Image (cartoon, rainbow, N blue to C red):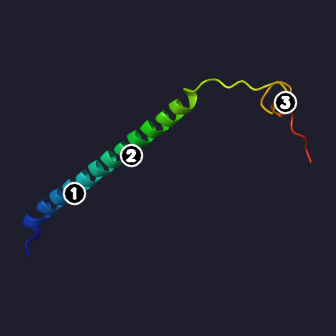
Amino acid sequence: MNNGTHEPNLVRRTLRTVGLLVAACVIFVGVLSALAVAITSRAVNAGGSGAQVTEAPGSPGGPGGAAGKKPLSI
C-alpha cells in the first residue's frame, strides 16, 4: 500500500464530505427556522387581527376588576 498516492485523495474526499454535511445541516436548520418564523408570525397575526373586546366594569378584566388588584401573599 502506497500512502503517498492515497493520502491526498483521502484528505480531499474527507474535506468534501465534511463540507457537504455542513452545507446540508445549514440548509436543514435554515428551512426549519424559516418554517418556525412563518408559523409563529401567522399565529401572532391571527390572534391580533380580531375585534377588540372591551370588558365590563367589575368583570375580572375590566376597570375595578380582579386584574387591577394586587395579589395577596399567603
How far apart are the two marked residues, 2 and 3, measured between alpha carbons?
A: 43 Å
Residue placed most toward the observer, 72 or 62: 62
Q: Residue furthest bottom?
A: 1
Identify the residue at image location x=11%, y=61%: 9
Q: Mark 2 — residue?
A: 32
Report the mark closest to the observer, 3 or 1: 3
Q: Secondary structure at mark 3?
A: loop
How far apart are the two marked residues, 1 and 2, measured between alpha carbons?
A: 22 Å
Res. 10 image quadrant:
bottom left
Identify the residue at image location x=19%, y=54%: 16
Q: Mark 3 — residue?
A: 65
Disc 1 and disc 2 in contact, CB within 8 angstroms:
no
Badge 2 crowding class, 10 Å Cα cut-off, few under 14, some 14 to 19, many 20 or more, is few
Badge 1 crowding class, 10 Å Cα cut-off, few under 14, some 14 to 19, many 20 or more, is few
Q: Which mark is residue 17?
A: 1
- Say what amino acid the circle numbered 2 marks: Leu
- Say what amino acid the circle numbered 1 marks: Thr
Residue 67 position within the rendered picture, expressed as x and y whole percent measured from the top left? 81, 32
Instruction: Examine the rendered structure and indicate whether residue 36 appears above or below residue 44.
Output: below
